[in-house]
Image: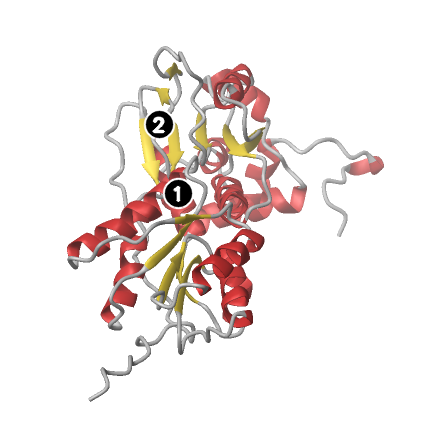
């Protein structure tokens, strides 16, 4: 079947009235469906969408923006990086935004640029976005900044304090400290006297949250926190830390702030003759796809990026479309450690000679 073909071979652009005629509904009903309004039955909505697809109809978003005062677009400020966490979160945001029918406009920031977030937000505001998602993981506020940047659209901030002031500021992706605490407590519950921490770079909010959770778990169990070893999220930095930790026979458990560093750590421990988990247990964070297939398979705390993006974007779209309504309640994914073969009770220590 040829779509949108009129008599005489002409192919005019289909209009909403054509969709209404094919679906057997009024033009107002078509408008309600594409405006995602309530009081349209699932059957009618399906008929309208099927008719629109058959005709190749696309709503006129420019005209709609003029009529509604909104552009049906959401802007995202994110760090330009291929690191697993930020990249996965951006992918989750992209999927959810597409499902909502909004256009997505992304502006990347650059690590080491204190003015990056402000510049990115201003760029998106110049484009007339209806709301902004800030997924900026690094604390790089410029010295001498005079308060937060003020914006007049709803803002969703993922996993960090808000760098802006807005009529509505929503948050999602918090609770990382609780997840880190649970990862540390898993090792303590196995019987380890203490847990060492391979931390991420402390300019990152997530690295600081994981450090806080590790410390809180040790304090709750009355254990003194050992010195922290800091990496840069890479497997190479985990390997370097592993060579340092392998030299200390008292190290029996390590919580690494991400899986890549944990994998490098395990390699260094193994090369030094420290077996994982027989001599040293290791827990990672993220549950990267390869974590289940390394040797040994890695115990890790997963991050539910899709769930965080969906919960946050649902609240943001509600705030955009219902500016006078109370914000939807926040929700966070459950903390659920994935236990694999890289953790075990500590090795038994030989008693004193009799």
Q: Residues within 10 Å of mark 2 (few under 14, many from 20)?
A: some
Residue 219 percent coordinates (x, y): 18, 52
Residue 25 percent coordinates (x, y): 49, 40
Residue 352 percent coordinates (x, y): 22, 82
Residue drawn 65% across and 47% down? 54
Residue drawn 45% across and 24% down? 130
| Image colouring | secondary structure
**Residue placed farthest to the front in the image?**
354
For label 2, the residue is: 162
Residue drawn 55% across and 31% down? 111
Residue 224 or residue 283, whichever sits in front: 224
Judged from the image, the secondary structure of the residue bearing numbered disc 2 is loop
Position of 58 with respect to 78 (left or right) is right
- Residue 247 visible to the viewer: yes
Asked which quadrant contains residue 203, the reply is top left
What number is the disc on residue 316? none
Q: Which of marks 2 and 1 is in front?
A: 1
Residue 316 or residue 192, whichever sits in front: 192
**Residue placed farthest to the right in the image?**
8
Please determine whether, in this image, residue 111 is positioned above or below residue 237. Answer: above
Asked which quadrant contains residue 131, the reply is top left
What number is the disc on residue 206? 1
Judged from the image, the secondary structure of the residue bearing numbered disc 1 is helix
Q: How crowded is mark 1: few (under 14 residues within 10 Å), some or many (20 or more)?
A: many
Q: In which quadrant will I find the C terminus? A: bottom left
Residue 81 or residue 254, whichever sits in front: 254
- Residue 175 visible to the viewer: no
**Residue placed farthest to the bottom in the image?**
354
Nearer-N-terminus badge (2/1): 2
């Amino acid at each position: 079947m040829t779509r949108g073909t009129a008599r005489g071979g002409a192919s005019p652009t289909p209009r909403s009235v054509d969709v209404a005629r094919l679906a057997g509904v009024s033009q107002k009903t078509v408008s309600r469906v594409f405006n995602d309004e309530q009081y349209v039955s699932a059957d009618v909505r399906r008929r309208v969408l099927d008719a629109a697809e058959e005709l190749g109809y696309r709503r006129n978003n420019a005209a709609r923006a003029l009529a509604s005062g909104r552009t049906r677009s959401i802007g995202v400020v994110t760090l330009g990086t291929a690191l697993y966490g930020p990249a996965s979160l951006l992918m989750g945001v992209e999927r959810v935004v597409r499902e909502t029918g909004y256009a997505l406009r992304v502006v990347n920031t650059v690590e080491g640029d204190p003015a990056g977030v402000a510049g990115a937000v201003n760029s998106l505001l110049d484009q007339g976005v209806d709301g902004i998602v800030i997924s900026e993981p690094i604390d790089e506020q410029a010295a001498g900044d005079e308060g937060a940047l003020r914006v007049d659209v709803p803002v969703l901030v993922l996993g960090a304090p808000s760098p802006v002031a807005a009529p509505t500021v929503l948050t999602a992706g918090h609770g990382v400290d609780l997840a880190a605490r649970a990862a540390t407590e898993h090792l303590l519950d196995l019987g380890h006297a203490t847990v060492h921490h391979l931390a991420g770079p402390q300019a990152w909010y997530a690295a600081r949250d994981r450090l806080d959770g590790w410390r809180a778990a040790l304090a709750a169990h009355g254990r003194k926190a050992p010195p922290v070893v800091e990496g840069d999220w890479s497997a190479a930095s985990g390997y370097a830390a592993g060579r340092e930790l392998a030299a200390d026979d008292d190290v029996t458990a390590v919580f690494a702030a991400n899986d890549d560093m944990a994998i490098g750590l395990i390699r260094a421990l193994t090369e030094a003759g420290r077996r994982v988990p027989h001599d040293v247990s290791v827990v990672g964070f993220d549950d990267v796809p390869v974590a289940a297939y390394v040797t040994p398979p890695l115990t890790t705390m997963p991050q539910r990026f899709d769930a965080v993006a969906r919960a946050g974007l649902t609240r943001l779209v509600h705030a955009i479309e219902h500016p006078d309504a109370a914000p939807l309640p926040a929700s966070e994914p459950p903390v659920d450690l994935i236990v694999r073969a890289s953790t075990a009770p500590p090795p038994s220590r030989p008693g004193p000679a009799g």
